Amino acid sequence: MALSGQGLAKRYGLNGYVAVQSADLDIEPGELVTIIGRSGSGKSSLLAMLGALTRPTEGNVLVDGHDVWSMSEDELATFRAKQIGFVFQFPSLLPNLRAVDNVALPALLSNSMDRDAAYSRALALLASVGLASRAQSFPGELSGGEQRRVVIARALTNSPRYLLADEPTSDLDEDTETDIIGLLERLRLSENIGVLIVAHDLRIAKRADRSFEMRNGVLHPAEIPDELIPEFTFERQFGPSICAPDLEAIPQEEAADDAVQLGSGFWAAAWRLLAVGGLAFFLIMLIDYGLAYYQNLRLVAERERRDALESLALAGLRSDVQTVRNLGDGQYELTIYFWNVSGGKPIYVMSSGVQAYVQVGNAWQEVTLRPVDKMDGSVVEVSGKQLYKFNFEARPERFTELLPHYMHVRFVNNLVVSPSKIPKDDLFERKDSYYVYLKPWNATDSEILKDMKFPGAPPTWIPMPPH
């Protein structure tokens, strides 16, 4: 049974920037597939569509011949929880929970097994990734490689049929990277799961059953050479030069006598006409080629400009919840941050509003949120890390407890990003969602500690990875 993407395309923004176009990809159980390519080439967008994290603009994602995106929201959530395991670029472990709690959490949230079975499964998975002795450790006590092993174990908790990994070794040293890739290879054989890895490194792609290359949103089969080159480069070819044949000399006819004979200059005139016509044709073709070459350069420059803008807006600017503070009586203070990590490039942000929601049943109920810092839509330059505060009230009569005694809260931040202080056509729309578990106003520490284990007092909030 294959996970199949057919004709997948994804467009973003007001101008319809094409991140992925007409991509076809099948992944079989037990198969290791890799996608390589430059940053901003569309690899992560394709992976998100295959994993049902983002809806394709065009095309279908099929499992067992059924269209994933024809499912209801509840069915989609179940599909993501039980059929797909995700390993993101950053570990995204919950810092207040132990390694075994982080691994057991997907089973508890999806109700795929009871508490005892979930923790038994978590301990077995940690042992399979070589972390049996670190099960009771908190993420802050683990190395980068150990955290990544915990993430892989967590992705396998619900026995998914497919594992999707987005740059799983990008921030690891070479030895740890080798261990993690070897671990994924062993697990896909022992668990018979299909594994798709998005990566930059040719050495990772070399170990796959099949490899693909993403270039400017287009997916191509990749042939990896036996001798790995140190840097993976893309060269654009604009075709061979246009050449014209040499022109032959025009023969001159001599008159036999002073009389002008009918048709005596025909061949001379014909050769001259042919030469002039050939030269004109050559010049027309040369001009046409020059215009095509220039237009292609403009298209390439525009595509690279849009790629750079997307990379700056998505990778150069980080944004998340800094803290949530309990003010009492159902009143809270939210602090979010914008962090320019682009290496000194200017980033300007115009925020169009932040909203807060509490999950009630299967729906999101909006709650009142007001900015403490003035955010009136003006353009703000982000340099380093900048904080913005909001007050909100969360006192729902009832709420969904994904984590015992805690509210499931979502903050949505709509913003426009640009590298220009006075933007024109260099705008990128971005919508961020931040998820947290929030301690209710009426919950006591003693009630929470009966069901949850924390190293100290129950925290006011616990961050969640994007989902």
Image (spheres, grey):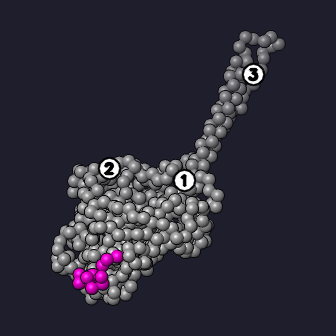
Label 3 sits on residue: 253
Query: In terms of depth relative to the viewer, which is nearer, 189 or 167?
Result: 167
Residue 79 or 242: which is nearer the viewer? 79
276 versus 333 height, above or below: above
Alpha carbons under labels 2 and 3: distance apart: 73 Å
Q: Quadrant of residue 453?
A: bottom left
| Camera-nearest residue between 28 and 145 | 145
Residue identified by numbered label 1: 303
**Residue 119 in the image, given as x and y percentages of width and height:** 21, 79
* Vertical side of 459 occupied by 14: above or below: above
Q: Residue 429: percent from the left, percent from the top?
A: 50, 57
Q: CA distance from mark 3 to mark 1?
A: 58 Å
Q: Are marks 2 and 1 in contact (CB under 8 Å)?
A: no
Mark 1 residue type: Arg
Boundaries of the magenta span: 441-453
What is the quadrant of residue 184 in the picture? bottom left
Which residue is disc 2 drawn over?
A: 60
Front in this rendered view, residue 136 or 23: 136
Q: Residue at x 49, y 53 (%)?
A: 13
Mark 1: which secondary structure?
helix
What residue sits 19% from the left and 68% below the top?
Answer: 112
Q: Residue at x 56, y 56 (%)?
A: 427
Seen in the image, is 377 located left or right of residue 445? right
From the viewer's perspective, is the residue at label 2 or at label 1 nearer? 2
Q: Earlier in the sequence, mark 3 or mark 1?
A: 3
